[in-house]
Image (cartoon, grey):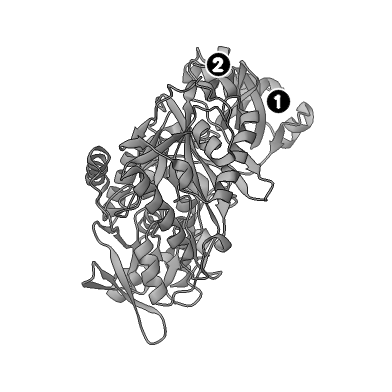
């Protein structure tokens, strides 16, 4: 197989093409580059698509393709064409059986033994991406796990969340954080990750998304996303498939305790404070907001440690401003709303960066506890909202938390969320960046009202308030320093009319549930910390990949 990078097509040329015409053009360009006839190409597979707007407003589509030849040898063709963008490569295909080092017959026997014994049952705690993908891989290979999700199924959950956004009446059992699909269900549905994919888990995860209703273009888009609307359908379909293949999924089933035997090994879980379910293996994919579960694990002396994360605010701009900066066009035709990624380091050494950027999206009230308020970003698949928003966050670590306790990061988050709740009286507090900056720096310059009419795009009620009072002075200074630097990258980013809302406190887990090289808790046999809540992932895709990895380890260790 030959892989070819950097096949360029001008946007003005491609935007008039349908899929068949595009593939025909790629075939011709590939044949010309390799100096072969199109008839010598048996199959062409698009592996990656990205946008190059460095010469804006002249925009190019950049493709990477894999080519399978017939009647010719790859090495001979490469030697003849001498193109630096072409190389012989081998496709990595994920194989669950090979990953755990067993043959199919042994795996089948192992699954039969586990399925026939209640005490050996595999329990998955949490139906976010990590839990769903762990369950999917297990049932696909003959195991029948029990998935316990504290929140509701995605349809009931959507109704509850919409009701909360309209009325402010919070359901602490089921909300933006808890329920089928995890926190990512009400997000932008981004499916890119920085995790290396040497074993093919990432591509397999994308295939599973497509099998369950996601569009095929996520297989090759450089920045794939499906939006909250499609993601809800995908997680529902995955759950139905898990059940069809023999697994069990239970909602409104919160694990409130873990029971251990005399050897410090798992023997059961307790659900909703009453029901006891025997098991010897728990995949603990609880999500980053399961604070009560963290405290239960602390009481059970499960080895954990505080970890750095980041806090900050959601920042909104008109999407047209971002489009103009990224594409050179305010309203580009046939191009999706433009994204961005920004990073800076302050003079004090703190990192400030954009996180979970949502083109054409909404800021949402993502609270899960009474008297506390957190925000997140969300968009639909069309990304058609009038505003772009992103978290602009500042790194914090245990020395900022005010305590040496293992869960000091949780209490740090809670204090910030209580401030935000009280400031907005339960509504999302919002402040113009110009007012925020002047309050932090003492600047008395006149407010530039170029974007004063910029209005929030939000799900949940909001109110204008002194958002600059939520974080400490040093974090506010870092935020302003970062915003001013970002204004040199994206013209207008630091405009007075940008909207700042808070608090963005759930960027990642404030704790790591430590695990060994076999995936188990370092001190409790049978507990497998997994995904974002356990501190081993940072988004939908990395959580899904970690769920697959832990599923392999559970089977290998049984």
State the residue at coordinates (36%, 50%). Answer: 182
Reading the chain from its start, which is encountered first: label 2 or label 1?
1
* Residue hosting label 1: 34
Q: Residue furthest bottom?
A: 262
Question: Foreground residue, 134 or 408?
Answer: 408
Helix, strand or loop at mark 1:
helix
Displayed quadrant of residue 6: top right
Reply above or below: 140 against 220.
below
Residue 495 in picture, x, y percent from top left = 55, 27
Question: Foreground residue, 533 or 548?
Answer: 533
Reply above or below: 143 against 165.
below
Quarter of the image with the C terminus in it: bottom left
State the residue at coordinates (69%, 23%). Answer: 36
Question: Foreground residue, 95 or 475?
Answer: 475
Helix, strand or loop at mark 2:
loop
Residue 339 in picture, x, y percent from top left = 53, 30
Reply above or below: 471 against 379.
below
Q: Which numbered dot is residue 423? A: none
Residue 209 in picture, x, y percent from top left = 41, 42
Residue 512 in picture, x, y percent from top left = 50, 64
| Crowd tier of the residue under label 2, counting other residues whose Cα lies within 10 Å: few below 14, some 14–19, many 20 or above | some
Residue 16 shows in this picture: yes
State the residue at coordinates (72%, 31%). Answer: 85
| Crowd tier of the residue under label 1, counting other residues whose Cα lies within 10 Å: few below 14, some 14–19, many 20 or above | many
Q: Is residue 33 left or right of residue 314?
A: right
Number of the front mark, 2 or 1: 2
Q: Which numbered dot is residue 329? A: 2
How many labels were placed on the picture?
Answer: 2
Quarter of the image with the N terminus in it: top right
Q: Is residue 63 left or right of residue 86?
A: left
Residue 37 shows in this picture: no
Asked whether disc 2 touches disc 1, contact meaning CB atoms under 8 Å apart, the reply is no
């Amino acid at each position: 197989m030959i892989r070819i990078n950097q096949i360029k097509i001008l946007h003005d040329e491609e935007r008039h093409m349908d899929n068949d015409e595009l593939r025909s053009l790629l075939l011709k360009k590939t044949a010309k580059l390799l100096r072969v006839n199109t008839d010598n190409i048996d199959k062409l597979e698009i592996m990656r698509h990205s946008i190059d707007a460095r010469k804006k407003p002249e925009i190019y589509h950049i493709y990477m393709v894999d080519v399978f030849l017939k009647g010719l040898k790859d090495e001979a063709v490469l030697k003849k064409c001498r193109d630096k963008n072409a190389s012989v490569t081998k496709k990595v295909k994920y194989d669950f059986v090979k990953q755990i080092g067993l043959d199919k017959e042994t795996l089948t026997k192992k699954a039969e033994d586990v399925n026939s014994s209640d005490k050996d049952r595999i329990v998955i705690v949490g139906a976010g991406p990590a839990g769903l993908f762990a369950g999917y891989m297990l049932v696909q290979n003959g195991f029948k796990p029990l998935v316990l999700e504290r929140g509701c199924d995605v349809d009931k959950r959507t109704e509850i969340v919409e009701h909360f956004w309209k009325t402010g009446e919070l359901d602490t059992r089921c909300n933006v954080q808890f329920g089928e699909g995890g926190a990512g269900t009400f997000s932008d549905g981004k499916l890119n990750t920085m995790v290396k994919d040497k074993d093919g888990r990432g591509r397999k995860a994308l295939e599973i998304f497509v099998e369950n209703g996601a569009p095929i273009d996520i297989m090759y888009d450089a920045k794939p996303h499906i939006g909250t609307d499609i993601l809800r359908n995908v997680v529902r379909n995955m759950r139905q498939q898990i059940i069809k293949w023999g697994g069990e999924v239970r909602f409104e089933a919160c694990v409130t305790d873990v029971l251990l035997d005399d050897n410090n090994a798992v023997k059961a879980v307790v659900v909703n404070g009453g029901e006891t379910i025997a098991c010897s293996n728990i995949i603990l994919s609880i999500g980053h907001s399961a604070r009560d579960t963290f405290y239960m694990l602390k009481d059970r002396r499960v080895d954990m440690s505080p970890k750095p994360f980041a806090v900050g605010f959601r920042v909104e701009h008109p999407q047209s401003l971002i489009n103009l900066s990224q594409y050179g066009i305010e309203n580009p035709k046939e191009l999706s709303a433009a994204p961005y990624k920004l990073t800076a380091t302050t003079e004090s050494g703190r990192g400030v960066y954009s996180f979970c950027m949502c083109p054409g999206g909404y800021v949402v009230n993502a609270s899960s506890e009474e008297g506390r308020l957190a925000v997140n970003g969300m968009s639909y698949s069309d990304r058609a909202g009038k505003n772009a928003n992103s978290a602009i966050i500042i790194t914090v670590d245990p020395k900022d938390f005010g305590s040496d306790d293992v869960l000091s990061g949780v209490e740090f988050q809670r204090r910030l969320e209580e401030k935000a709740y009280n400031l907005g009286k339960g509504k999302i507090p919002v402040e113009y960046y110009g007012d925020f900056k002047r309050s932090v720096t003492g600047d008395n310059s006149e407010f530039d009202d170029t974007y004063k009419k910029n209005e929030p795009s939000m799900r949940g009620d909001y109110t204008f308030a002194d958002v600059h009072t939520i974080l400490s002075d040093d974090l506010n200074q870092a935020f302003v320093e970062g915003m001013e630097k970002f204004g040199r990258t994206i013209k207008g980013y630091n405009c007075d009319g940008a909207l700042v809302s808070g608090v963005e406190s759930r960027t990642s887990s404030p704790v790591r549930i430590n695990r060994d090289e076999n995936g188990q808790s370092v001190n409790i046999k049978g507990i497998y910390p997994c995904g974002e809540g356990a501190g081993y992932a940072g988004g939908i895709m990395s959580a899904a990949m970690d769920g697959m990895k832990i599923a392999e380890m559970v089977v290998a260790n049984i």
